[in-house]
Image: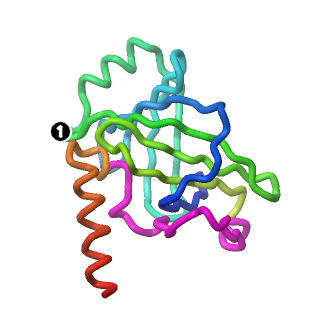
Amino acid sequence: MEIERQFLVEKLPPLPEKFAFLAQGYISLEPEIRIRQIGESQYFLTVKRGAGLVREEWETAISFQEFGNLKERLYPGTCMIRKKRYRLPLPDGLIAELHVHAGHLMGFNYVEVEFPDVESAQAFIPPSWFGREVTEDARFSYGLLAQENGLEILQQILQKEHINDQ
């Protein structure tokens, strides 16, 4: 079970020197099946079901060879997402995982916070540098943004909202 809130980040806070490089790709979008490489030697296969604040999640370590085989079988029209993940401490022992993207999503910044329970998630007051919350907005799912034109999709969503707000 994963209990998580996600936010867009327009202006980055001061960043620590330490980060993890991640690459992730999608084998399936429904259910969400993804592969992820963390650093040079960690590889994972993750299955997620559901949407929004609470989702089912199952994750297992895989080998470099398994990762490579699955990387050749990404969901049609998608590509690997490349990003740096910064872990920033928050009050109450929580951790903000800030994702600063490279590659086809360069310029997109995103932060997520995992919680031990729904009550903690609902009571959470985000820091001022967190932007708009997108936890319940499927348009900002990584499965969608993994598409080769993911940044264009993101820009179109934000532009439509800007026009509708005027």
Q: Residue 123 in the image: state x and y as whole percent.
A: 72, 73
Residue at the top extreme, as displayed: 65
Residue placed at 30% from the left, 59% from the top?
154
Could you tell whether 10 is left or right of 148 in the image? right
Q: Quadrant of residue 118?
A: bottom right
Residue at the right extreme, as displayed: 92
The verdict on residue 131 being magenta is yes
The verdict on residue 54 being magenta is no
Figure check: 132 above or below 64: below
Q: Residue 161 in the image: state x and y as whole percent.
A: 31, 76
Residue placed at 55% from the left, 53% from the top?
12
Q: Which residues are magenta?
A: 118-143
**Other residues around mark 1 within 10 Å, as few (<14) / some (14–19) / many (≥20):** few
Secondary structure, mark 1, is loop
Q: Residue 50 in the image: state x and y as whole percent.
A: 44, 59
Could you tell whether 157 is left or right of 119 in the image? left
Could you tell whether 30 is left or right of 132 in the image? left
Residue placed at 31% from the left, 87% from the top?
166
Residue placed at 68% from the left, 57% from the top?
115
Residue receiving disc 1: 76
Residue 70 versus residue 126: which sits nearer the camera? 126
